[in-house]
Image (cartoon, grey):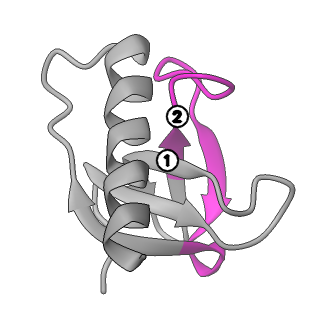
Amino acid sequence: MDITTGMVIISAAGHDKGQWFLVTGVDGRYAYLADGNERKLAAPKKKNLKHVRATGQALSADGMTDKRLRTALRGLSRSIAEESE
C-alpha cells in the first residue's frame, strides 16, 4: 500500500515504535509524520517509508490542530485495539 498524505500510520521501527502518526507529506523514500504531541504539525518527523505501517485509516488535514490530531489518533488507536480483541 502506498503511503500518502492524510494517512494514519504506525511506526514499525525506532524509538517511536508502535506510536500512531498522521502523514503530513511524502518526499521520495521519506514520510513526514506528526502526532500532535511530541511531533507537532508545524515540525513533523522525517521517517523512512520502510519503517512505517499503514493502518488503512485516513484523516482530513483541513482545519487540523495539534489538539484535534491528538484526540483523533487516540480515538483511532482505541477503536482498532477494541476490534482486535
Question: In the structure shown, which secondary structural element does the residue marked by tag 1 occupy?
Answer: strand
The stretch of residues the image draws in magenta is: 32-52
Residue under the image location 64 percent in, 48 percent down: 46
Name the residue type under label 1.
Phe
**Image height of 15 relative to 82, above or below:** above
Identity of the amino acid at label 2?
Asp
Find disc 1 in the rendering and name its residue: 21
- Front residue of 41/83: it is 83
- Camera-side residue of 24 and 19: 19
Label 2 close to label 1 by CB (< 8 Å) = yes
Gap in angstroms between the C-alphas marked 2 and 1: 5 Å
Whether the magenta-drawn stretch holds residue 10 is answered as no
Give the position of the N terminus as an image quadrant.
Answer: bottom left
Q: Which residue appears farthest toward the front when viewing the image? A: 85
Which image quarter: residue 24?
A: top left
Which mark is drawn over residue 35?
2
